[in-house]
Image (spheres, rainbow, N blue to C red):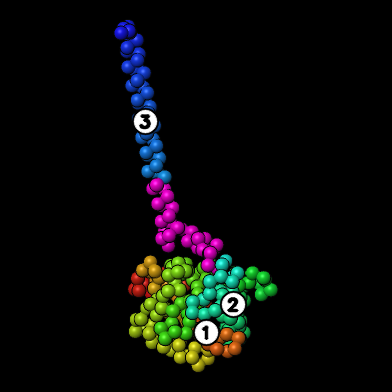
Amino acid sequence: MQIYPLHSKFKLLLYIEVVLFFHLHARLCCAFTSVLVDLTSREAITKRTVLGSSPSLSDDFLDTPFLLQSLNGGPKITGTERDIATHVELVDTSLRDLTGIGVSERMGLDLESPELYESICTNTRYVLITHGTEADPIYNFGNNAALAAFFRLWESLVAMPSAQSVVLRPIDEEMRIILMKKVTDDGFVEGASGIRVRDDGAYIKLVDAIVWNCHDKSGAKIGQAAFFDRNKCPIIDTLDQA
């Protein structure tokens, strides 16, 4: 058996300890990095999927997949054969026929633009939201501004009866009855107000909203629409602030 001098054994032990130290350090760094990456990924996923956790919520809707698909003959408006572009055109035209000014003009858009209806859909300031003609009407469209205002994803919005968003305080119910009678009689009402519930539990106070009946090209009623400026409609935490 070969015998090593004492100092050689010491060097060997020191070398082994150094190797073990760096090996263990490397493993710990990898483990820490994995945890950090996992936490970062979870945070990123949460910001993408939980509305309102990102300060730039509206930006998340600027490239809305449903819109791009539907404008190219993709998914239809629920319960109809209309794609979103056709639906928005009918809603826009209905308001113009009733008041002389359509959604496009109220948004300040170029009526000759080939991307007119896409611009209505992706607008983040002016809310356009519609529901169908069911006995308990269900929302079937909301542009980017509507999704942000109501704090909902598209899939959530178009599965919700419109009545679920309405706050029914006595004063609000009285006003709603008056407004709905005017819509029935005249086809539209301007200057509407009210309180709507957001999906985060807060409320949006509607100011100077327009509500109107929408028709297809044959004159058949296809539902109702509402339009308002988000910049005029504050978000409130409690009804006491209304």
Q: Main secondary structure of the magenta part?
A: helix
| 213 left or right of 200 in image | right
Dot 2 or dot 3: first in sequence order is 3
Mark number displayed over residue 86: 2
Q: Which residue is mark 3?
A: 25
Instruction: Please state which amino acid type lies under the numbered disc 3.
Output: His
| 123 left or right of 179 in image | right
Q: CA distance from mark 1 to mark 2?
A: 12 Å
Residue 141, percent from left and from top? 50, 75
Indicate the quadrant where residue 201 lies: bottom left
Q: Secondary structure at mark 3?
A: helix
Q: Foreground: 121 or 192?
A: 121
Image quadrant in which the C terminus is located: bottom left
Mark number displayed over residue 222: 1
Residue 240, percent from left and from top? 34, 73
Report whether residue 88 is seen: no
Dot 1 or dot 3: first in sequence order is 3
Q: Look at the numbered discs 1 and 2 and tell me whether their residues touch, using CB distance below 8 Å.
A: no
Q: Secondary structure at mark 2?
A: helix
Image quadrant in which the N terminus is located: top left
In the depicted structure, whether residue 224 falls above or below residue 232:
below
Q: Foreground: 155 or 201?
A: 155
Report whether residue 112 is seen: yes
Magenta segment: does it hold 58? yes
Magenta segment: does it hold 121? no
Instruction: Please state which amino acid type lies under the numbered disc 1.
Output: Ile
Residue 124, percent from left and from top? 53, 67
Magenta region, residue range: 38-67
